[in-house]
Image (cartoon, coloured by chain):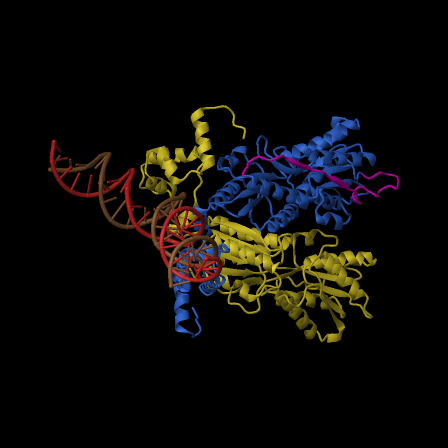
Chain colours: A blue, B yellow, C red, D brown
Amino acid sequence: MLLERSNKLLTLEVWEVMRTKATILDIARAAGVSKSTVSLVLQGSDRIRSETAAKVRKAIGDTGYVYNRGAANLRKPHSNFVGMVINDLTNPFFAEMAVGMERVFQAAGIVPFIANTAESPVRQEEVLKSLMEQGVAGLIVSPARGSQTDAFQRVEAAGIPVVFAMRRLPESRIPIVAPDNIRGAFMATRHLIAKGHRRLAFFGGSLELVVYRDRLQGFQEACAEAGIREDAVLLVEGETSRKGGMACLNSALAASEPPTAALCFNDAVAFGVMLGLRQHRLEPGRDFAVVGFDDVAEAEHYVPALTSVAVDTASLGERAAQTVLKMIQSRTTRADDHIGSVNLVVRESCGPTRPNGKTAKGEAA
Amino acid sequence: MLLERSNKLLTLEVWEVMRTKATILDIARAAGVSKSTVSLVLQGSDRIRSETAAKVRKAIGDTGYVYNRGAANLRKPHSNFVGMVINDLTNPFFAEMAVGMERVFQAAGIVPFIANTAESPVRQEEVLKSLMEQGVAGLIVSPARGSQTDAFQRVEAAGIPVVFAMRRLPESRIPIVAPDNIRGAFMATRHLIAKGHRRLAFFGGSLELVVYRDRLQGFQEACAEAGIREDAVLLVEGETSRKGGMACLNSALAASEPPTAALCFNDAVAFGVMLGLRQHRLEPGRDFAVVGFDDVAEAEHYVPALTSVAVDTASLGERAAQTVLKMIQSRTTRADDHIGSVNLVVRESCGPTRPNGKTAKGEAA
DNA sequence: AGTCATAAATGGAACGTTCCAATAATTCAA
DNA sequence: TTGAATTATTGGAACGTTCCATTTATGACT
């Protein structure tokens, strides 16, 4: 350890700090006051003469002291951080949501810690445990695929406010903030039908996901409304990624009477489908219509630009954050669900917009 | 608070839990043992008879007890979480890096908490403070743009291991894990020159970023090597985003003798440049050559596929995580820098690869 | 049954903070 | 100057855990 030569006393102090980290008592000694005084200064009390406070702050400055919140919470149970448990950080959709949440927390002077579960319920369990042990004040969770309801029993039993974001669990009293998946899928499917398509497919996702069931429901309702027979629609489950999308397309094109249009579980799947179309020498938008879901930033810039159901990710994130904040403040563990309105953004992936064709914009609830 | 009617005793217990959360003492009472025994069970000691341990675990189960790590750390200073401070979570590049880090930490039984600074040094300060107060064991930081060296004094003074990822600060003794930006830019530029381009541009970024200076240096070295005169190269600073890329391109095309090829600060800028080219009715790859930096997943799928400098983000993340783990274990605050090798991945955005043209693959150090 | 060795369980002090109750210092009116 | 009123400061107990030093229970062997 290279220490420049300097004032011996200072050096000694530095060493002292390294061997056992400074406490409130050390800085009390250094400033010639009592620990109580230091504590008061630390919490910005106005009962301390300003010159005393200055002395204390100086001591804090050159001691390298760090406040021990764990110890403080022992006496004053008032944690000031929240956790955001995200199922897949590499999905820009969830990253955008996280950013929306952060805006709200930052404004409230709260630091959110993010933890990634990578869709693993086991990991999720670990993460929740760790967050709780650390004394988290509230949680926003977008549950990992395959989470069981009882994974959140511990959290509920501890009385920690939780809100689910984007995904809900089959039966759970935890409030949720999510987009209107049923209506979104309905609008998108209606759009495809209006473009003249009669053989439709739904690509990607799987029944274990509640979100999938919702979007599928919207899809099927629109089909039913248009009088499309059950055997004219093709459901292909698959991974919710580009790769999954390509796989879905391949198996769909192998059918005896392949579909001419598809609603995709999300944008990633849609990108994969478009990629696959090119490999089959089919042009997305001309030879096959594709609609995505989520409207991530990339959708706008892709070639062809992707028609997608916009869910206003960031403001859903904000809403979730506000909800959990309110729950923390009112020390309740209940809150109302919030189903955010959605919007079909029509671009190029379903063929050129006809001048007289109405877009579904503004139809949202 | 809706409580279904049930066993009165249980209900009472639940209420007890809600008013003041259960401690080790409560579960000791419930299990008919001493707090010490509970503590031992909690840390998996083998000095406790298994049936006693079972009793205790049962009590823990139906009390909704949560371990208070803050209190524990008071006696046994052994925190088991690390912090990852990321400058921009919405950039898939950093998200990928974070995922690489997580792999390593998870294997080590450590939970990493992620915090986003959104390129704000102020936010970064808050985040670091909060992490330290919580008792973080080590930190991986990719510093916010414009961070000052002294922003990390507190952390260093506290003796907390830190490693910088991807970005370094002008003068700091904190170890860094980053790609070989100079060499990457050099290889990319050489590639453009080999394709016959003589009027080159460097798009995006700004001098305050050390990474920018490095990439620029590699760019300029390659130009010098090829004998390209200083006034034949164009430097356009700009935001490191799609929008920034479009802006760079526009100002470049407005020049009297516009460039025919550009090395972009990162892939986001490159995507923006390609977008801008299309708006000018220029086809990227044919009318103008573009190289990106980072090789994010999207680069491969874009149309045209983007030639980019691959930095193996995930393994840099892993390396950073390993480094900080080692530092924590050996309680040191020093470690060697690691400069990761880079690789030019040639795709379509610089025109078709000529059969006899050598790709730069495998040239990495 | 009585030793002993070993295993299992326990009480109490300590960790760094907060906050109440108490003390010390200052100000001000008479 | 004195006393009261006010303002500043302080000691000590408590928070939930760990761990050392003890005590108590359990067997194994004469």
Residue C23, located in which quarter of the rendered image? bottom left
Drawn side of residue C16 relative to residue A251, left or right? left
Drawn side of residue A52 relative to residue B125, left or right? left
Q: Is residue B199 above or below residue B312?
A: below
Residue A244 lies, in percent from the top left, at 66, 41
Q: Nearer the viewer, residue B174 or B320?
A: B174
Q: Is residue A303 above or below residue B252?
A: above
Residue B105 lies, in percent from the top left, at 50, 51
Q: Nearer the viewer, residue B188 or D17?
A: D17
SS assignment for the magenta stretch, majority: loop
Residue at the image position 65 percent from the left and 57 percent from the top: B295
Query: From this viewpoint, is residue B109 visible?
Result: yes
What range is drawn magenta here? A331-359
Q: Nearer the viewer, residue A277 or A194?
A: A194
Queried whether the magenta region covers residue A355, the answer comes back as: yes
Residue B363 lies, in percent from the top left, at 62, 65
Residue at the image position 75 percent from the left and 75 percent from the top: B231
Query: From this viewpoint, is residue B326 visible?
Result: no
Residue at the image position 52 percent from the left and 25 percent from the top: B4
Residue A307, located in which quarter of the rendered image? top right
Queried whether the magenta region covers residue B238, the answer comes back as: no
